[in-house]
Image (cartoon, rainbow, N blue to C red):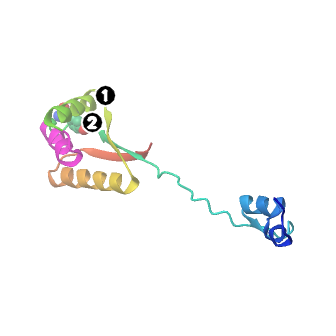
Amino acid sequence: MTKTRRDADRAMSWQQLQMMARGTVGDSDTSVVTDTRPKTKRPPLYKVLLLNDDYTPMEFVVAVLERFFGMSHAQAFEIMLTVHKKGVAVVGVFSHEIAETKVAQVMDFARRHQHPLQCTMEKE
Ligand code: TYC
């Protein structure tokens, strides 16, 4: 197949193709990166921790785990016992905003009931 002069004019040079692939325009001196590959970094996750103490009633902790972490009674009892025996347990993993909300809800609920229960979060 014969290339006309117009076809040749329309064809892109290898250099032009490379510049497109790299996302650069202009002379090599003054090239600017224009590549806008979407950066899809997942947001960091945060562990919500429940801490043991000597005063908060076991049934109160079970109620907290049911109410704020959607656990069944059996699950909640199991996790409560883990905290009681080991001193701490992860009760959920969430985005920063959700983790912050959970911690605030638990701390407020404990304070209103005058229990010293402590709940914290840490980056996973
Ligand atoms: N150690 C408490 C008790 O013996 C029970 C308890 C469990 C407290 C878990 C806090 O996060 C906790 N009454």
**How far apart are the alpha carbons under marks 1 and 2?**
8 Å
Bounds of the magenta segment: 59-71
Pinpoint residue 27: horizontal percent, then vertical percent.
85, 70
Q: In this view, does 2 lie above or below 113?
A: below
Find residue 25 and report its horizontal and vertical position in percent.
77, 69
Q: Can residue 38 be seen in this view?
A: yes
Of 118 and 1, the residue lying toward us: 1
Q: Which residue lies furthest to the front in this view?
A: 1
What residue is disc 1 on?
86
Task: Check the image and report above or below for 97 versus 75.
Answer: below
Are circles 1 and 2 on residues that touch, CB within 8 Å?
yes
| Magenta segment includes 60 | yes
Q: Does the residue labelled 2 lie within 8 Å of ligand 1?
A: yes
> What kind of element bears circle 1?
helix
The residue tagged 2 is 52
Taking the spot 28% from the left edge, 45% from the top edge, the residue there is: 118
Q: Where is residue 69 in the image (x, y as percent from the top left)?
A: 23, 45
